Image (cartoon, coloured by chain):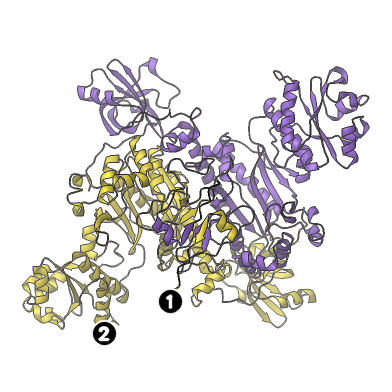
Chain colours: A yellow, B purple
Amino acid sequence: MAEDVFSQRTVTCGALTKADNNKNVILNGWVHRDRNHGALHFINLRDRYGLTQVVVDDDASTELQDVAKELKLEYCIAVIGTVRLRPDSMVNPEMSTGEIEVKAEKIEILSKCPPLPFQIDDGKDTREDLRLKYRFLDLRSQGMQQRMKLRHDFIFACRKYLVEKDFYEIETPTLIKSTPEGARDFVVPSRIYPGKFYALPQSPQLFKQILMVGGFDKYFQIARCYRDEDSRGDRQLEFTQLDLEMSFVKRDDILTLMEGLFGQVFRDVMQYELPVHFRRLSYADALNTYGCDKPDLRFDLPLSDVNELSEKSSFATFKEIVGAGGFVKALCAPKTEGVEFSRKYITELEDAAKIYGAKGLAWIKVGADNALSGGVSKFFAGLESELVSKMDAKEGDLILFVAHENWKKCCASLSAVRTKLGKDLNLIRKGFEFCWIVDFPLFEYNETEGHWEAAHHMFSMPQSQYLDTLESDPGSVKGDLYDLVLNGYEVASGSIRIHDVELQKRIFRICNFDDETAEERFGFLLNAFRYGAPPHGGIAPGVDRMVMIMSEQTSIHEVIAFPKNTAAVSPMDDSPSTLDQIQLDDLHLIINYPKEKE
Amino acid sequence: MAEDVFSQRTVTCGALTKADNNKNVILNGWVHRDRNHGALHFINLRDRYGLTQVVVDDDASTELQDVAKELKLEYCIAVIGTVRLRPDSMVNPEMSTGEIEVKAEKIEILSKCPPLPFQIDDGKDTREDLRLKYRFLDLRSQGMQQRMKLRHDFIFACRKYLVEKDFYEIETPTLIKSTPEGARDFVVPSRIYPGKFYALPQSPQLFKQILMVGGFDKYFQIARCYRDEDSRGDRQLEFTQLDLEMSFVKRDDILTLMEGLFGQVFRDVMQYELPVHFRRLSYADALNTYGCDKPDLRFDLPLSDVNELSEKSSFATFKEIVGAGGFVKALCAPKTEGVEFSRKYITELEDAAKIYGAKGLAWIKVGADNALSGGVSKFFAGLESELVSKMDAKEGDLILFVAHENWKKCCASLSAVRTKLGKDLNLIRKGFEFCWIVDFPLFEYNETEGHWEAAHHMFSMPQSQYLDTLESDPGSVKGDLYDLVLNGYEVASGSIRIHDVELQKRIFRICNFDDETAEERFGFLLNAFRYGAPPHGGIAPGVDRMVMIMSEQTSIHEVIAFPKNTAAVSPMDDSPSTLDQIQLDDLHLIINYPKEKE
């Protein structure tokens, strides 16, 4: 047995109060701050549980004084000492241990620390790659500590709720068959079978459906998923989702379950009360009213359809677009103190709109008594009160228009304007606004490939009224699909699934998978459907994004212990990296390095 | 919104009792059994929650009769009907729903099922590959359903206990740097960086240590781990461990935590009371007493050291081996009704011993009044009572000896005999016998490679009394290592870790990693140790094996929803499989197919 090589804590750094006065204690932790008043040393000792002030008195032994002098930030130490009350003037009511301090009798240095590469705070001023390289230091910051705890609390609260609702958590394999559709698969070469590969799952989709066929009725899993996508700020190669599936359900069962789940989880974890039911918007209504299918409902600023008014106006551009079957939509930016609706600002708004396809952003200022001025106001002469009433506009407001022959582009462009206004005009309320988007189109036309493809994925059920017209009119088919949106982010996506082989094959065919290819790729799912598959459906909230929003962050890197950077690299362990030749040989691989361009 | 395309259950198949008499209900489930008494149909309808008897009366409508006739095993159906009491003679007290039946008014076929490839029972008679190919059917068996529930319950109970003990569950990355040592890494080619690879973790070892450096104090994770090992019955490419790590701890803190954890989990999940503390055996004592470091303590049958008696005997073989510094060990197989200690049986025991290096198995039968007979008895003339007393032998017992110059081989050979006797003589008590094995050697000499290597892994702390002699006498160094053994299986392995750069480098050097290679492979860990690393330690129970033992199975395939077979293949989805040329090109890979041997 090892002898005791360090003095082990009897109490954590967050525990001591005046009730512990005169107690002999041992603390273990890190030097968080170190102040030196002559021969008097104050050390703020930190661990996960809090901070305790340690004092080396000026009458301390030379030995102790010497150790105290040696201390530097982030040294890991053991302090043996006695609890005493702080003088009244030194009491810190902000600290749980603010009434006491520990008079050090002995200090052991457990391990040293060189000068820090950056200050351990919330990394606001530190380059991200430096934070990631020294993640073991960055993780000591209060922000990272709190967010890792929030993530832990969130996930555990989800589990607890689902366990109480009789769900089983079942682990599905992560070395599976490659069935790429949509994103690329990460693959794992087999050493035993030259030329063969396992794939890492993009989600447990097929396996959770097979669990339903296997009779598990209610399944969930906190599942690691993998997508080999080109890097984007908000994406990671691996991510975590709360994956769930239920048998014998209809859409509203899933929606109600999720409302109950997040209601309880937000109550437990955030002490935040959500409404019993979340607002529901059809895909069409979401686009018409907010311009997008993931509206931020923390502010209103709805879009209006002004086709009719545009036709009555004398503005040729609008009239032409409406005449050609196009759309004119408008929103009313409210007068806001400190924000001037200047030409420059309107140009900024226009730039936001143009990213999504708008050719321009028309505008009109609203004056007193329904007077309109500037921009395209002259074309609405005689229509002033009708327009002001339609837009519910007030003096000082700014009406903004986008016209486009394409409905989606018209909506998306004005949505970008709405989003920018929400921020700039301080319209965003504090809190969490969930909503459901339902009745999505089942198919989208892929212009590049020249065929229809699944808008969500190929396993979602078409709504039954479209069953006869799937092939003849794919574009109009709505699916039993639902997205959960929180504060303008899509946080979950789900559907009622197909459980019938023939219907599944029809969908595959519409998506350009002939029967042979479908059998080759998805034969095991089709086979499962042949053996008494139950009706089923599910959903999969993204854990990273949920926790990011809950902790008021804008990057998922802030809620992942060891994320890759935006270049898909981990600066800490320097992965990905090259392999030994032996490893490559074992795996029967030769690297086909791209030729240098000459 | 979809119209309601099936009649959704109002109650599950495990819920109805006589209190529900006359209630109108809808059930969804599978046809578990279907009996036909003339025009009277009895259908046992099954879901995850139980079985309910459905009756189609002989006066049912022709339409309903026709549907009932169409039903076959494992059809998924909805039954609309009325609960009624069974006639007294038909009450089944073994079923929770055994007092009632549901008189069907309508049956909807939700999906059909062709003739089954095998009977859905506990798969005792079915070839495993067939079970795995049709896993969606196999999972419907009572055994698989119960084991998946047990696994779920076990994991959730572990989580609950650790959460209550203030642990955070933190997800570590699964696309990491390849640092092979021991087993081979599975790797994932990078598309963005030609020739570079991520590796799948063999365990979260380095990351959990870095989390301790990051100040998280108490971490756990139900972690998926990956090892590219040659297939063995009890191994999977991917497996699950309960990975945990704590800061500022000593060995006994981890042992006590685990005793508390499994105590609570066995109570919650199995209604089984474990002792407050588990037996502790040093590695040396375990080998001496049971012949191996994972003894099955559900039976006694200890090994005895009979070197002294052997020297006194006239058996030249034994005397020579003892004279040359070797070992003679013996055990006493108790007389057992129905088991004859025949020549044939003793040969079977000898065969078991020889696998582990014994050259033979000497034996002596014990008669009345300490009489010895057969085998090597004549060499122990005059030592009868001493031997019988030493071995605590009784009339009818069989004493078995192994002699070997190598202590480990002597122990292991006799351990194999002990294991076989345990089964054959019905010595194994019901229940769960945990024990700790401690004080393991830190290093083992690798004869093939010609250098020392870590017996467990390179991050384990040598016991402090050996710090000065690490390099001069690696073979005698004991580590702060501990294994948890349950019913003869190693179920967890852990250690107090090194947290000092210089000590870590000394261990690397002893294990033949020069400083440069160590920096290249483990630089990020060494770097973390430089920045105030706390003392820390941990352990990692294997979930698959724990649940296997708890459910009294002998293969982990029985407790994994979708295992690979022993050839590392999934017969259901047929992975691993080949990739498209486009995928290979994207990943910059060429397959180096092995040349056919001519």
Q: From the viewer's perspective, is A458 left or right of A194?
A: left
Identify which residue, B330 or A215, lies in the foreground. B330
The three-letter amino acid code for the residue at tag 2 is: Lys
Where residue B4 sits, quadrant-wise, is top left
Image location (x, y in percent) of residue B258: 64, 47
Amino acid type of the residue tagged 1 in the rendering: Glu
Total numbered labels: 2
A100 above or below A163?
below
Residue A283, placed above or below residue B367: below
Judging from the image, mark 2 belongs to the subunit labelled A
Label 2 or label 1, whichever comes before in sequence order: 2
As helix, strand or loop, the secondary structure at mark 2 comes to helix
Q: Mark 2: few, some, or many residues within 10 Å (few <14, many ≥20)?
A: few
| Residue wearing tag 1 | A598
Percent position of residue A581, x then y: 58, 60
The percent position of residue A33, horizontal first and vertical second, equals 62, 75
Badge 1 element:
loop
Q: Position of residue A11 (x, y in %)?
A: 66, 60
A259 displayed left or right of A473: right
Q: Which mark is residue B55?
A: none
Question: Which quadrant would the C terminus of chain A be assigned to in this image?
Answer: bottom left
Name which residue lies at 17% across and 51% down. Answer: A473
A459 to the left or right of B186: left
Front tag of 2 and 1:
1
- Quarter residue B424 falls in: top right
Is A585 displayed left or right of B374 in the figure? left
In the rendered image, is residue B173 in sight?
no
Dot 2 corresponds to which residue? A344
Circles 2 and 1 on the same chain: yes
